Image: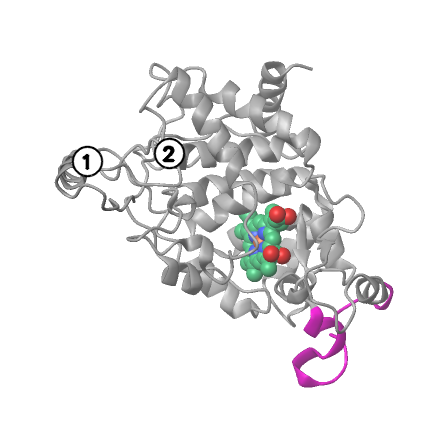
Amino acid sequence: MNSLSLIATALCCVVVVFGGLPFSSNAQLSPDFYAKTCPQLQSIVFQILEKVSKTDSRMPASIIRLHFHDCFVQGCDASVLLNKTSTIASEQDAGPNINSLRRLDVINQIKTEVEKVCPNKVSCADILTLAAGVSSVLSGGPGWIVPLGRRDSLTANQSLANRNLPGPSSSLDQLKSSFAAQGLNTVDLVALSGAHTLGRARCLFILDRLYDFDNTGKPDPTLDPTYLKQLQKQCPQNGPGNNVVNFDPTTPDKFDKNYYNNLQGKKGLLQSDQELFSTPGADTISIVNNFGNNQNVFFQNFINSMIKMGNIGVLTGKKGEIRKQCNFVNKKSSELDLASVTSESMEGDMVSSI
Ligand code: HEM
């Protein structure tokens, strides 16, 4: 099946399964935003991701996570893509991101192709949002029509990344308040956590669960004993912690409802995952059961919550900018003038580049 027909099939399924456009959109975003200025956008995004996914089956997971880590830190504004410079403390160096984020190069690849056909029109924030949606489709998950019109930030915020992104040992209360701070509710928390049906995590995030949970000297009692043994093999006690483990032991690269069935079977990989099902009396248990019993219900909720997450703190209108290169803010013309004057007048001296 070629890429366009695959997009059409995915969109058609959204309509068939859910009977219409399922988005509760931010009023300023619109699926038609680039209809006139960059009609080729969707197919460029799809074609590049489809190609890369053939050699990197983990790529869709990494892109979906990148979008999440963008949106939770000053909104979906591509701030996560900004590299470290003399004026920017990169979010990529924040605790939850360092040595962890993957495939930013794929977003750059898309941006380069998009700039060739529609220069200065399409934001990196929209490319990342679209790429997350296509990544869901490529891994067998739902497709949806993505509201567009975000602009790119002029800043990044590393300390906010450290504060806002939830950690793997979070309690249910901590997870709920981290999501609530972004305007996301408990159903959003459970639906979006379903992305952990894809991808991998490093052992260092679960070593405590495997060997010394809460300083008890024993494993986490909410772990299934057979699964515990498998994980202990993959993550030796005194190992460096850099081995990676699949979130879903059975279909690691397929977007399905297995995440919830794993939680029901005490096979959640992170403590934060298992909290959704094993916290006594929690209101999340029935949501996990609901999604675990019916994949269509999970998919529909995942779509709603991804669109909601994609609306967080967006810059529209004249705010922010359309970056030329996703890893750097554009130079202001005044700075360019200054740079050329400085380089002429200070011959031989280095002109600092942003
Ligand atoms: C609920 C709180 C969450 C916590 C505590 C959490 C934590 C983590 C951690 C620790 C990893 C492994 C990172 C590494 O090994 O370097 C990870 C991976 C991942 N996360 Fe989350 N996450 C959460 C929510 C989400 C959400 C909302 C999404 C997307 C909608 C998401 C998507 C992913 C994906 C797809 C991966 C695998 C990435 C890859 O293989 O490259 N996570 N997460």
Quadrant where the C terminus is found in the figure: top left
Assess disc 1: are there few (<14), some (14-19) or many (≥20) residues with their C-alpha within 10 Å of its C-alpha. few
Q: Whole-percent x and y of residue 273?
A: 64, 60
Which of 252/309 is in front?
Answer: 252
Question: In the image, what residue occupies the spot 67% across and 45% down?
Answer: 198
Write down the region rendered in magenta. 207-226
In this picture, is 252 found above or below 29? below
Residue 220 appears at what percent x and percent y?
73, 74
Would residue 191 be visible to someone looking at this image?
Answer: no
Residue 333 position, x and y percent, is 17, 33
> Image quadrant of residue 169?
bottom right
Is residue 78 in the magenta section?
Answer: no
Residue lying at 61% horizontally and 38% vertically, measured from the top left? 60
Secondary structure at badge 1 equals helix
Q: Quadrant of the N terminus?
A: top right
Left or right of residue 87, residue 47 in this image: right
Farthest bottom residue? 216
Q: CA distance from mark 1 to mark 2?
A: 16 Å
Q: Which residue is mark 2?
A: 325
**Residue 120 position (above or below residue 58):** above
Which mark is nearer the camera, 1 or 2? Answer: 1
Measuring from the top left, give residue 197's x and y in whole percent: 68, 47
Q: Is residue 172 left or right of residue 26?
A: right
- Is residue 212 shown in magenta? yes
Q: Which residue is mark 1?
A: 336
Residue situated in front as seen by the camera: 37 or 309: 37
* Dot 1 amino acid type: Leu
Q: What's the residue at 40%, 15% (across, down)?
A: 117
Disc nearer the start of the sequence (1/2): 2
